[in-house]
Image: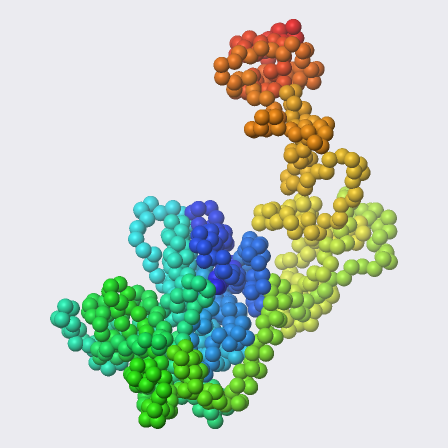
Amino acid sequence: MPVLLFLIDTSASMNQRSHLGTSYLDIAKGAVETFLKLRSRDPASRGDRYMLVSFEEALAGIKAGWKDSHATLMTELRNLQAVGLTSFGQSLRTAFDLLNLNRLISGIDNYGQGRNPFFLEPAIIVAITDGSKLTGSSGVQDELHLPLTTPLPGSELTKEPFRWDQRLFSLVLRIPGHTSPDPEPMGGVPLDPSPITPMCEVTGGRSYSVFSQRMLIQCLESLVQKIQSGVVINFEKTGPDPPPAEDGPIEMKYGPQSWHSCHKMIYVRPNPKTGVPVGHWPIPESFWPDQNSPTLPPRAAHPQVKFSCVDSEPMVVDKVPFDKYELEPSPLTQYILERKSPHTCWQVFVCNSAKYGELGQPFGYLKASTALNCVNLFVMPYNYPVVLPLLDDLITVHKFKPPAKWRQSFENYLKTVPPYYISALRKALRMMGAPNLLADNMEYGLSYSVVSHLKKLSQQAKIEADRVCALVGKKAALEGGIKLRCRSSALSLAHRKDFTQLLHSIMGDGPALPIEANTKEFVGFQLAALNKALKPQGLRNPYDIPRSHLLDQLSRMRRNLLHASICILKGQDQDQLHSVPIAQMGNYQDYLKHCPSPLREADPDQPKRLHTFGNPFKLDKKAMMVDEADEFVTGTQSKGKRPGESSSPAGGGAPKRRRCMSPLLRLGRAYTPPKTPPRRNSFVRLVLHLFFVIAHNTIHQIILLPRCPFFLCLNAGYEKIFYLLKQIQGSLETRLIFLQSIIKEAAR
């Protein structure tokens, strides 16, 4: 179940507009919606989790977290506003902490007991920003810095704030404000030179420099393809370079090459039956666990795996499980495939994983596939060149009845293996059919203090996760502000009826217009103090007003004094009270929540009107039928029938039509006017419609007249009337004379 976290830049610079006419923030919102549509095409997207983080401070920036639905994500996405700073480092640290909330609770990192690639929670962070200067409370920054302090428990166990299954991809919007006359270059999307790019490369992702809408769609399609289940590993060469292969190039290159060090991902494929990755052997830790150590050394987010270029024989023993992972295409995989040697392998190591020796013992090997289309990492038991022959002898020679000599060799091997391999080795022996070779009371290598500390961190992480989930979407209260209070019911002297007249006689101004009192306008508001060192005061010191602002301040005070009929200052005029931002126009459900409960229906016998946005008089058309005169009749046609009577014909087949087809649509039939006289309502409608057509000279509406239902009910032939209407020319009086003749002709 991958996690997709969208990190949206909500700084003020995102309000700049491109040549498309939309702001960068609108482009970012549209990019998220397009990404979700592209991802929904994949059936595997049913288990995705979506999160949303903005550039606001602390927990207020988390708009959608672990327990929020997809509808909450879309609502918070539409309500984002670009009003803050470009605090990319702080927001990215908040995103990493949000992803790492459940890791200590679930024990997925398995600290001190090896790294299990099949214990993963793949996460992709998609950051959308404009690539402007990084600004924060401390000023402008040239480099991206993540805060070192975090409230997340257990963060000191990993050196980096991210984990090996979390990758960062950034879409840096560089769309110009005017259309470029040069043609758009075709090809791939280049890397962005902003300080965000190094952070993306460290996590195993990359950045995209977007210059057009086409490039944005191209980047989104590429990101959808990168949603893979896997972990990132650092592969580094140790020892000399390999000799040239027989079929490979002969020239030798000296110095560091691109394939010597690769920072790439290995794909962890899920089980097709269960959908969950299954594995057996961990990647060893970079230290030997000490039972007397009270703490664990911090680990790197990505393990450093060394590979030796010495050709070795790949070893596989029947009934002994192993793990196979495919490497992401890189210069290393390209170099191995160019050697065209699928029957040899290169062993892999983790430094300081053994009790003695800096390089450690091999735990697997790199090998090209037989078809030479990919490179696989085989993870075997630790020091597999020693244990695999022993297990092969146990199966083929001793038939699971080992002698004392074999047991002595096996015990010597166990002394060179890290203690956390005992659990995996016991499971493998149980699968092979030898469950009694290892005792159940063998220790795992972690001291009691370390185990208790990990349990304590897990409990603290659960408390912190519940606290964060409860505060998601809630804004922090302002501190140090001036709270606005409503006045008491007692009226002051300013409420006297003659107070305004008294001021009018003194100042000589016109009477003040009455303004409606809105007692709830400023309830719960606070006035923030610019200088937090000063103590908030209820009144402003007149000496703090600059000399150039005195007249404006007096005019403002005078206007508030004269226009305050009930001495309540209004910060909005009548137009602003009824104005709604464009971003809030479609948020109709929130408006309904604040509306009072509707009253009961005055006449419950009338058909119930459905709630529809836009037209409050729209009726339910399912229980209505239309007659030939275009009049609505409530109820169904089968209302007068008995319960046992069927509405379908006796011979079966399709049900009867509710409304006859128009005579003009019937092929091969001539229209004959009805013998019954037309209804007066239909005739009046025709006259009014003709008058509107002639008065406004909308001749294009005349063509639609013969198809009107009430027009077909007239005794006059519509061909003749249509001919007369097309002959109308001249002034309005001339057209009205023709209208009279048409009415007389139609009334016969």
Closer to the camera in the image, 684 or 678: 678
Left or right placement of residue 491 versus residue 417 in this view: right
Left or right placement of residue 422 versus residue 522 in this view: left
Left or right placement of residue 633 versus residue 97 in this view: right
Closer to the camera in the image, 246 or 391: 391
Q: Position of residue 247 (x, y in %)?
A: 14, 68
Quadrant where the C terminus is found in the figure: top right
Q: Position of residue 357 (x, y in %)?
A: 32, 90
Q: Residue at x 41, y 77 (%)?
A: 431
Q: How many marks?
A: 0
Q: Residue at x 79, y 38 (%)?
A: 604
Q: Residue at x 42, y 47 (%)?
A: 19
Q: Position of residue 362 (x, y in %)?
A: 31, 82
Closer to the camera in the image, 690 or 552: 690
Q: Position of residue 359 (x, y in %)?
A: 31, 85
Residue 642 higher or lower than 435, as above or below: above
Residue 513 higher or lower than 470, as above or below: above
Q: Residue at x 62, y 6 (%)?
A: 745
